[in-house]
Image (cartoon, grey):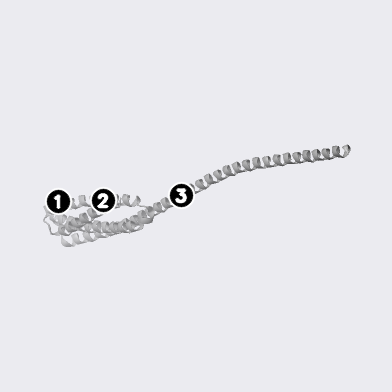
Amino acid sequence: MSSDFEGYEQDFAVLTAEITSKIARVPRLPPDEKKQMVANVEKQLEEAKELLEQMDLEVREIPPQSRGMYNNRMRSYKQEMGKLETDFKRSRIAYSDEVRNELLGDDGNSSENQRAHLLDNTERLERSSRRLEAGYQIAVETEQIGQEMLENLSHDREKIQRARERLRETDSNLGKSSRILTGMLRRIIQNRILLVILGIIVVITILMAITFSVRRH
């Protein structure tokens, strides 16, 4: 499973490097090429998000005791993804301002004001996105803690069940041992009674023999 994660990791690294390079080139391209490049970057950003989702699923399959390192790496990749999206938004705003100026012939001051307003809105969206990301991370960590607790409870339940089974086996063995001991005691008592009876018979026989002997004399 870790090999799948590392494969996704390598694909993500290659893809984000390409996206970074293309975002940096957007402001310097002619309008037609800019439009095509923007569409290309949007597609690659979606691919990068899908890779992150696959990596997140792989991390959830990792045993809890080994998951911490991968969670740290995932946080780093998500931060990198957020930075790429921010850079791309700024690049698109610059691109949109330039296209609008070419089509409408706006003066420089109007363009700058609109750009500042859009940047301000972008910053607000970024802050909201960061809060949502933090909430999502807390939810994921809470889910992981819940899974660990459920696994621990499952292990404890198995231990209790095994202990109960051992107790039942012990009770059964004690019952058998008790029956065996009772039988042995019964046979010992019977043997002692027989010995006492035989002893009495022997004593009576001896006394009778002595009595007959005395009478003859």
Amino acid type for the residue under numbered disc 2: Leu
Q: Earlier in the sequence, mark 1 or mark 2?
A: 1
Q: Residue 9, image x and y in percent?
A: 25, 54
Q: Which of the pair 118/18 is nearer the observer?
A: 18
Is the Cβ of the residue at disc 1 closer than 8 Å to that at disc 3? no
42 is higher (above) or lower (below) than 215: below
110 is higher (above) or lower (below) than 162: below
Q: Which of the pair 20/92 is nearer the observer?
A: 20
* Left or right of 189 in this view: 159: left
Amino acid type for the residue under numbered disc 1: Gln
The Cα atoms of the two marked residues, 1 and 2, are separated by 23 Å
* Left or right of 122 in this view: 200: right
Q: Residue 200, image x and y in percent?
A: 78, 40
Q: Residue furthest front?
A: 217
List the residue tagged with mark 3.
Answer: 155
List the residue tagged with mark 1.
Answer: 36
In this rendering, the label closer to the viewer, 1 or 3: 3
